[in-house]
Amino acid sequence: MKKPVLSFFIVLLFGSLLMAQLPNGNRTLLHTQTASTVEKGKLEIFSNMNFFTRAADFIGSNKPIDFDAVNYWLVAGNMAFSYGISEHFDATLGIKVYQDTHYPNEYNLPDDIFLTVKAGSFSSGRGHFKSSGMLSFRIPSAEEHNYPFAKYASGSFEFGLLGAVSFYLDPYLPERSFNMHFNMGYWNHNESGSEIYEFRQNYGSYQKGDKLKATRSSQDFRMALAAVFPSELFDFRMELSGILYLTEPNRFVYSAEEWAFFSPSIRYKPLDWVSMDLGADFRVSPKERQATSTIIPDISGSLDLPGNYPDWTVHLGLNVGFNLAGKGTYQAEDYAREKAKQRVELFETVVKEEEKAQKVQNEIENLRRVRKEAEEEIEKIKEQLGED
C-alpha cells in the first residue's frame, strides 16, 4: 500500500462522524439484527470503521534481495441511515467505503450501496418475543471487487432475505434488560455471466487484460446469534455469525470459503441520543484456504498473510439518533412502556440522590470522629503538661 496514513485518515473522516453495519439494516449490534424497528419518525445514523493490519514477511528461504516486510492494511468505513416509517416498518440506506484494496486504485471511495426494508416489532409471548423480516439489496458502485481477505462482493446486483427473532427479559424496558437475538437468512450474489477477475499481468497461460466470467450465481445461508447484557452506561455484547454456501462461487473468487466469527463488543451510552462502540471479530472457522486455485495469483502463497480471512478485526463506531416527528401519539401498550420507563428513571434518580446524601452523611460522621479523637489527644497533652 502506497499511502497507509492517507487511507487511515480518509476512513476516520467518513467513519468517525457516521458509521454502520452492512449489508442487512441498522447497526444495533455489529453483525446481528434485532427484530425491533426504528421508532416512527426517528432518524438513526450509525457508523463503523473496522481494520486489520500485519507486517507480512516473505515465506520460504529464497527471499528476494533487499526484501522488506510488507505493511498490509485492510480498512473499511461504513455509514448507514435508518428511518422509522411507521410502527412496524423502517428503511436503511447504507454506504460501504472499503479502503486499501491493494489494487492500482488503492481504495474504493465509495464502495457499494445497500438498501434494506424491514417489517418488524411484531410482539408475541406477552411482549417478551419480537419477530421481523428484511429484504436487502446490494447495488454495485465500487471500482474494484473480488479482492483477498474480504467477504465476497461479486460486483453484481445482489439481494437477500433475513429473518430475526428477539427475546427481551423485560418487555416494558427491553433495552435495559437482558436480551437475545437470532438471525437466519439467504443471500444471492447473482454473478452468473459477470466478469469477476481481470489479470493485471501475465500469469500462467493468461495474458495481461484477460478476464474471467462467473459460470454460476453463488448463494449462501447465513446465521447470527447475539446476547446483550445492559447496564446504565454500558452494553456488553457477544455475537456469533457465519455463512454456509448453498451454491459455491467459482474457484477464481478469493473469498470462496465459508466463514464464522465470534465478536465481543461494548457499547457506551453517555446520552439517550448518542452511543459509541468498541468491538472485535475473532475468526473461529479454519484459516486454511479450502478453495485452493492456481487460476489466479494468491498473495498469501508468498507472504505471511491470512489463508482466507483475517484472524482478527477491530471495530470502532459512533451512533446518533434524532426524533424528527416529536413524541407523536402512543398506543396503550407504548404509553404503558413509556410510563414504566419514566418511573424507573425517576427511581434511579432518587436512589442516586440518596446514595449521595448517605455519602455526605458518612463524610460528616468521619469528620466528627476525627475531631473527637483530636480533642481527646489535646486533653491528654494538657494533662501531661500540667503534671510537668
Image (spheres, rainbow, N blue to C red):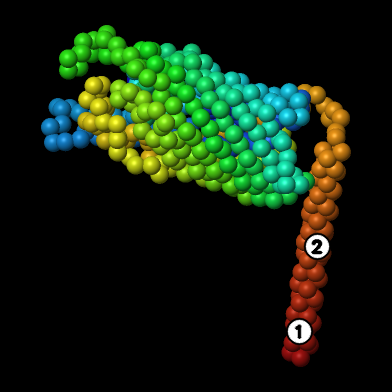
Q: Toward which corner of the image does residue 207 lie, by quadrant?
A: top left
| Marks 1 and 2, how far apart at CA | 33 Å
Q: Which residue is mark 2?
A: 358
Residue occupying image coordinates x 29% and y 11%: 211
Residue 1 vertical position relative to residue 63 in the rendered view, above or below: above
Q: Nearer the viewer, residue 142 or 123?
A: 123
What secondary structure is marked by label 1?
Answer: helix
Q: Which amino acid does the dot numbered 2 rest on?
A: Gln
Q: Nearer the viewer, mark 1 or mark 2?
A: 2
Residue occupying image coordinates x 39% and y 28%: 247
N-term-proximal mark, 1 vs 2: 2
What secondary structure is marked by label 2?
Answer: helix
Q: Which residue is mark 1?
A: 380
Q: Position of residue 209 (x, y in %)?
A: 27, 8
Residue 274 vertical position relative to residue 372 in the rendered view, above or below: above
Q: Quadrant of the C terminus?
A: bottom right
Residue occupying image coordinates x 83% and y 40%: 333
Q: Position of residue 50 (x, y in %)?
A: 48, 32
Q: Quadrant of the N terminus?
A: top left
Residue 203 located left or right of residue 211? left
Residue occupying image coordinates x 53% and y 25%: 160
